[in-house]
Structure formats: C-alpha cells, structure tokens
Image: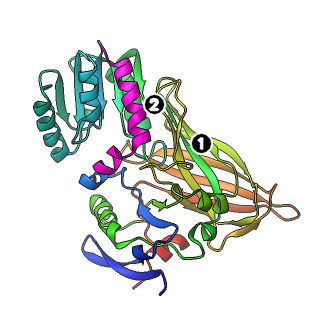
C-alpha cells in the first residue's frame, strides 16, 4: 500500500485536499505544521513541551540560579506557569506572568493559587508589547523561541521588553539563540516515500488556517529527522551554519541579512535546507541543537528544488538569509536567496520565502504537492 495519499481537511469556509500519510506504516519522516507562531496551543502541545527534558532541564537550572531576590517578568507563561512558579519557589520577590491567550491565562491563575503563590505572582492577560508594569523588573524569562530562532516573535518581543519593561543591564533567560541550516536530501530522509501529514495532525493545520482566516503556504516541519541518527547521516549533506543570531543579553537585532556558506560533505540530491535552532539558556551553557537532538522544536523544511540537484563533496551553497517583520510587528517573515556552485558548471540560483501569514496559497511546487488541486 502506498504510504502517501490525498485526504481532506477543513479551511475557513471550505475543505481542501491535503497530502496525508499512513502513520501506522512508520515512515521515516512526516510533515507537521510549525504551530508556535499562532495562538493554537492546546493540552497536547503543552504536554509535549513539558516532556522535552533537555529544554525543560536547561531552564530549570537557569531560573533558580538567577531568580532569588529579583523581580521577574515571565513572557508567555502558559497554562502551567512553569517558570513563574520556578522563579517564585527560588525566592523571587515578585513575578509578573504574561499570557496572551485567555484560557491558558485563566488556568495559570488557578494553578498559581493552588500552589500558594498568588501573593507573589501576578498573571497579566495580553501581549507583553502592550502591557505596562508598575516597575521595571530585574530579570525576564521567556520560552518563546520557535522552530526557527525568532519565528514566534522572540526578537521583537524581547527587544520591546528590554526597552520598556526590564531594567538597564537586567538579565534575560534564554541568553542567546540562532537559527541553523543544513543541506538536505529529502528523498534520502523519507526513504523515497513522498512525505505527508499523518491524519492525527490535521487539526493543527486546520487551527493555523483558522487563526489566520484562510489557507496559505504555511511553514512545514519534518518530524522524524531528530530521532534517527541513521536518517540524519544519509540525508544531511553538509555541516550546519548559523543565521539569525539573537543576543538577548546584548545588542538584540531581530531584523537583518545574514550571509552564509554550506560546503557539501557527501554526495546526494540537494532538495533544500533543514532549518533548526540552537539555544543557550544561560551564557555558559552548551546549546540545545534541534537539528541533532530530539526536541519539540522540529526542523523546518525550506524547499529549494522540486527534484533535487545532484551534488558532490566540495560543492558549495552560498546564500543570504533575510529576516523582516511582518505587518503584525511581532512575527518575522523569512527569505533566502542563494547560489549552488558545482565543479565545472554554472551557478544555480535558488530561492525560498516563508512569511508568517502570506496571501499565497499553492504558490510553490512543494505547497502544490502538499495541498493538491481537487
């Protein structure tokens, strides 16, 4: 039985065809929408974040280390108010816990009250960029790093916090993030099977479309790359490079152009990039690396060639990675322009664009595959 087939999912006002896969057949790599950029968190997403032992462990070490005696701002506290409670338990003088989604904010208040910290943690419902605090705080903790470093708005949100809500030279957790890129052979990653969404994740695609109000060419992740060293070994064609550096305790610049070069280390068919994130919770941390280890930050796929371009060791892909703010002022739009340089042939120009809420739908060959015409 073929693994890939066409099904349907709901979009505002209609249903649309979608490329699906049989989850039971255990394909090496499956598609998953990047959801953190949109207000679609549910119990499943929160539970998965709490099960991310490496991610949780880094924060669990950093917050108690720096919170005692300080006033703290927790941006994106979530329904479990994990880091607001961790800061209060560690001896923070007061914590302001900000949550934009009404239901998680309501649940967080109950969790905090039941834990006995209602006198030291104040839940504020809204966007951190639109709130005021009675005083500037000593420290800011946030867990709004996305599948790409800034995709959930960490750059713009924490820049605003630095300018308005945190004292000069106040401390930020995490310390730094960067988006990472590695050349990918998608066919090798999937074992030759065309990728699709397992039906269990249709609801996340539907919720993202509902949040924006229409179907669009959404950002797609590749679930399965992190879990298997064998899959990474045969599908990663280069070492990784960093772009979109975000220095939360330094000169934070969420917009800009980064230039990078990938050198191919093994032969294959270059179909695009796997994009991940490195995160330093504290300055002296070893970074979390979502391209190499399992994480709830699942690698994003940036398709560059529909069929895959043959490459050999020593070939190079040079590119510019551009980050600009979308019209909501919070979430970035990404663009990549580059050239593939192969021995004895002309340079091949390649492009990719991924906006937070673009008007385009089925604009690229990849998205026409994922969402075929009826």
The answer to which of 140 and 286 lies nearer the viewer is: 286
How many numbered callouts? 2
The residue under the point 37% across, 50% down is 37
Q: Is residue 60 magenta?
A: yes
| Within-10-Å neighbours for mark 1: few <14, some 14–19, many 20+ | many
| Within-10-Å neighbours for mark 2: few <14, some 14–19, many 20+ | many
Q: Is residue 100 above or below residue 333?
A: above
Quarter of the image where the C terminus is located = bottom left
Q: Is residue 136 above or below residue 118?
A: above
Residue 364 visible to an observer of this rendering: no
**Percent x, y for residue 174?**
43, 30
Residue 45 visible to an observer of this rendering: yes
Residue underneath mark 1: 243
Q: CA distance from mark 2 to mark 1?
A: 18 Å
Q: Is residue 206 magenta?
A: no
**Percent x, y for residue 183?**
66, 56
Residue 58 lies in quadrant: top left
The residue under the point 28% across, 55% down is 44
The answer to which of 175 and 321 lies nearer the viewer is: 175
**Percent x, y for residue 302?**
56, 59
Q: In the figure, is residue 68 to the left or right of 57?
A: left
Which one is earlier in the sequence, the residue at label 2 or at label 1?
Answer: 1
Q: What stretch of residues is rendered in magenta?
A: 47-68
Res 281 label: 2
**Percent x, y for residue 271?**
64, 66
Check disc 1 and report its element: helix, strand or loop.
strand
The residue under the point 46% across, 54% down is 298
Q: Nearer the viewer, mark 2 or mark 1?
A: 2
The answer to which of 153 and 312 lies nearer the viewer is: 312
The residue under the point 80% across, 57% down is 315
Check disc 2 and report its element: helix, strand or loop.
loop
């Amino acid at each position: 039985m073929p693994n890939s087939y066409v099904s349907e999912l709901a979009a505002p006002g209609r249903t649309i065809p979608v490329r699906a896969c049989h989850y039971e057949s255990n394909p090496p790599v499956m598609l998953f929408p990047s959801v953190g950029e949109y207000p679609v968190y549910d119990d499943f997403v929160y539970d998965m974040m709490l099960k991310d032992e490496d991610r949780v462990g880094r924060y669990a070490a950093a917050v108690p280390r720096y919170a005692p005696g300080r006033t703290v701002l927790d941006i994106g506290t979530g329904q479990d108010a994990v880091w607001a409670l961790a800061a209060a338990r560690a001896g923070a003088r007061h914590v302001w816990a900000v949550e934009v989604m009404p239901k998680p904010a309501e649940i967080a208040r109950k969790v905090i009250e039941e834990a006995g910290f209602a006198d030291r943690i104040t839940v504020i419902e809204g966007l951190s960029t639109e709130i005021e605090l009675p005083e500037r705080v000593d420290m800011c903790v946030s867990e709004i790093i996305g599948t790409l470093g800034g995709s959930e708005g960490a750059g713009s949100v924490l820049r605003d916090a630095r300018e308005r809500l945190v004292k000069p030279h106040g401390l930020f957790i995490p310390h730094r993030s960067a988006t990472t890129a590695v050349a990918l052979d998608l066919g090798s990653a999937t074992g030759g099977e065309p990728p699709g969404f397992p039906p269990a994740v249709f609801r996340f695609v539907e919720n993202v479309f509902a949040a924006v109000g229409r179907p669009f060419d959404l950002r797609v992740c590749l679930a399965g790359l992190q879990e298997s060293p064998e899959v990474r070994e045969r599908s990663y064609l280069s070492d990784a490079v960093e772009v979109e550096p975000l220095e939360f305790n330094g000169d934070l610049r969420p917009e800009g152009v980064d230039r990078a070069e990938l050198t191919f280390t093994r032969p294959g068919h270059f179909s695009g990039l796997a994009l991940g994130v490195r995160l330093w919770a504290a300055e002296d941390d070893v970074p979390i690396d979502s391209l190499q280890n399992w994480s709830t930050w699942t690698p994003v796929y940036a398709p560059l060639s529909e069929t895959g371009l043959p490459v050999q060791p020593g070939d190079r892909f040079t590119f510019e990675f551009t980050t600009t703010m979308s019209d909501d002022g919070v979430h970035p739009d990404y663009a990549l322009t580059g050239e593939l340089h192969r021995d004895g042939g002309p340079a091949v120009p390649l492009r990719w664009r991924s906006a937070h809420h673009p008007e385009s739908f089925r604009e690229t060959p990849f998205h026409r595959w994922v969402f075929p015409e009826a």
